[in-house]
Image (cartoon, rainbow, N blue to C red):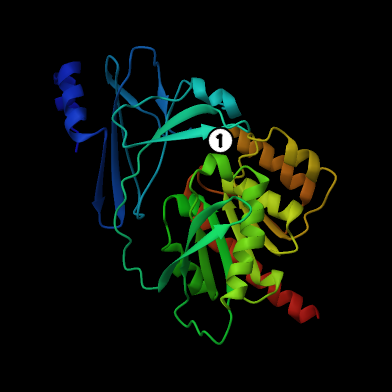
Amino acid sequence: MFNIDELKLKSISEILEILKQSGSVYVEKNGDELKIQHLFVSNGDVHSLEISNRLKFKQIKKDVWFLEYKRDYVNNLCYYFFKDCEDLKGEARDSHIIDDIYAKNKLNFYDENGEIYFSQNYILPVLSIPNFSLKTETHKIYSQILKKEYEIIIAFPKNYDKKKQQKCLIVTDGGVWHYSIHLAEQINEIDNFIVCFVLQQDRSKELPFKDFAEFVSREITSYLINNKLAKPDKQNFYFWGQSFGGLTALYIDEYFSDFIGNIVCSSPSLWFKNNKFLDYYEKNAPKTNFCLSYGNADFKPIQNKTKILAEYIKPLNTTIYKGGHDYVSWNIDFLNTIRTLKMEKKNEKRKN
């Protein structure tokens, strides 16, 4: 791990050499807790750094910034960081992205014309999934809509019976991007689901657009039904989308509710489409059993627009959870949402 006192005594060139050899991020697991450190050397034009409105870098010497924090253990983590920013709005983010040449990966974001409007470095130390006990299968589906082949990971409940078709939850973006399939175990402690994770190939060209939502709604559900993995009933299908996947969730509700009857939309990136969805839902009610959520530490544009969306559509359930724009917060919130939906189903049966 990095030692601040030692770093203060080193020159910039010595610190850069450390980064070249070791990378800019250290992650150490202590029991059920992760200790995370990030060391960043700026080019002189950075006055402050943050990765959320709660976590800020400390300046330990000229152009050298240090962050240390702890969080609950998960199988991986992801964050990106900004300079001197408060309320980020859509395409304006590109002027705030920190370019860390020692980050492990690079992610490009594209606009509707296929042009990159900003590139984001992100850190993704992938640790092994702890004690995963559910059976999983990887299936390949060729999409006639998108003209390419996709992989989906299917996790089966412990009491899975081939003769008894299960309810099916389809997940994309936050929970899949980080491969947090251990979530399936937690879901199945509440109710029996086949959990289907859709692996995107280029999320910024797929998730914010209608065609990907149609692929999920028409082709994936058809595949699961034809292979006798799910019941041919839209109320048997659930879709959970986070961030850009939240836009997929909104497309499904607006255009493809004949295929999927239950939607959980977490922290939708409403800034991407300007006010396209707000304009629609100002005049239209949701067509599915719709649940909506966002974090109290989420990006301000997402908080503000999701709050407006909630006022328009009056969903079955709206939660403001404790957390930011990250999949750990989404996972916790989602499990509570599944409990709510299950209770609603029971109440409906009692009324009937």
Instruction: Give amino acid for label 1.
Output: Phe
The residue located at (50%, 68%) in the rendering is 187
Placement of the N terminus among the 4 image quadrants: top left
Quadrant of the rendered image containing residue 183: bottom left
Residue 195, horizontal then vertical, whole percent = 51, 67
Residue 251 visible, this angle: yes
The residue located at (81%, 81%) in the rendering is 352
Residue 251, horizontal then vertical, whole percent = 70, 49
Name the side, left or right, on which 287 lies relative to 102.
right
Residue under numbered circle 1: 299
Rate crowding at label 1 as few (under 14), some (14 to 19) or many (20 or more) other CA atoms within 10 Å: many
The residue located at (75%, 75%) in the rendering is 348
The residue located at (50%, 56%) in the rendering is 150
Above or below, 332 relative to 158: above
Q: Residue furthest bottom?
A: 163
Q: In front here: 61 or 14? A: 14
